[in-house]
Image (cartoon, grey):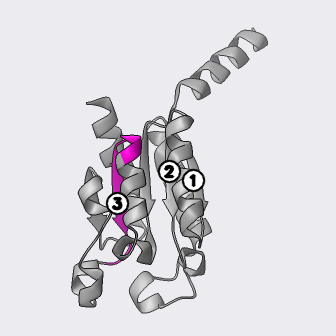
């Protein structure tokens, strides 16, 4: 009986949808950086919230952060090659500068949710343009850490649709 239930558990884990949550430059400084804009919760706290919500939705998460554009591109490609059901990306400032990130997202043909903690449209004008948005299924911004949960919900509904 123990082996059978253990097998069922392993099968369930393997069948859970894999979602990559990728975070770009300076997001490792959350909780320290401009707390009036980004809040006091650090990235580890956000990861904990995201993993809990993903589990409720029957998803498993690969959660990462980098300050390097090329690494972020490699992870977008990896999500595709590992069979991810979708991708949530908070590209940070690369949102406004990276045509390469736009191209990588277009190349993988995965459902992608662009995510920002702050409302980028209520901030400096240079933040109003995104190279990621035209390649993404949707954008969530301005809801702080709750945005990660909202993005998972949006991705879950688009993957199951």
- Asked whether 117 falls inside the magenta stretch, the response is yes
Answer whether labels 1 and 3 touch (C-beta < 8 Å).
no
User: Do the CB atoms of the residues marked 2 and 1 lie less than 8 Å apart?
Assistant: yes
Q: Taking 150 as reference, is 129 left or right?
A: left
3D distance between C-alphas at marks 1 and 3:
17 Å
Position of 36 compared to 11: left or right?
Answer: left
Q: In this figure, which residue is indicated by the disc labeled 1?
A: 74
In the displayed structure, 31 sits above or below 52; it is below
Residue at mark 3: 114
Split into 4 quadrants, where in the image is the N terminus? top right
Name the quadrant of the C terminus.
Answer: top left
Q: Is residue 132 magenta?
A: no
Residue drawn 39% across and 45% down? 107
Q: In terms of sequence position, does the residue under pointer 1 or pointer 3 come before the other?
A: 1
Q: Is residue 156 visible?
A: yes
In percent of the image, x 41 and y 42: which residue is there? 108
Local packing at callout 3 (Cα closer than 10 Å; few below 14, some 14-19, many 20+) is many
Please state if 120 lies on the left or on the right of 84 as rendered: left
Q: Position of residue 37 (x, y in %)?
A: 39, 87
Determine whether 107 is above or below 9 in the image.
Answer: below
146 or 15, nearer to the observer: 15
């Amino acid at each position: 009986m123990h082996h059978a239930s253990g097998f069922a558990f392993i099968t369930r884990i393997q069948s859970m949808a894999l979602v990559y949550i990728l975070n770009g430059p300076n997001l490792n400084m959350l909780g320290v950086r401009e707390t009036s804009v980004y809040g006091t919760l650090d990235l580890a706290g956000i990861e904990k919230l995201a993993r809990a919500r993903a589990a409720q939705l029957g998803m498993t998460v690969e959660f990462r952060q980098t300050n390097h554009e090329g690494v972020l591109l490699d992870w977008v490609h990896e999500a595709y090659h590992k069979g991810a059901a979708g991708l949530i990306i908070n590209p940070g400032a690369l949102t406004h500068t990276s045509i390469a990130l736009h191209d990588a997202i277009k190349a993988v043909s995965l459902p992608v949710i662009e995510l920002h903690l702050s409302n980028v449209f209520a901030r400096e004008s240079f933040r109003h343009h995104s190279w990621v948005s035209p390649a993404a299924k949707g954008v969530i911004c301005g809801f702080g850490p709750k945005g990660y949960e909202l993005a998972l919900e949006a991705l879950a509904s688009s993957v199951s649709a």
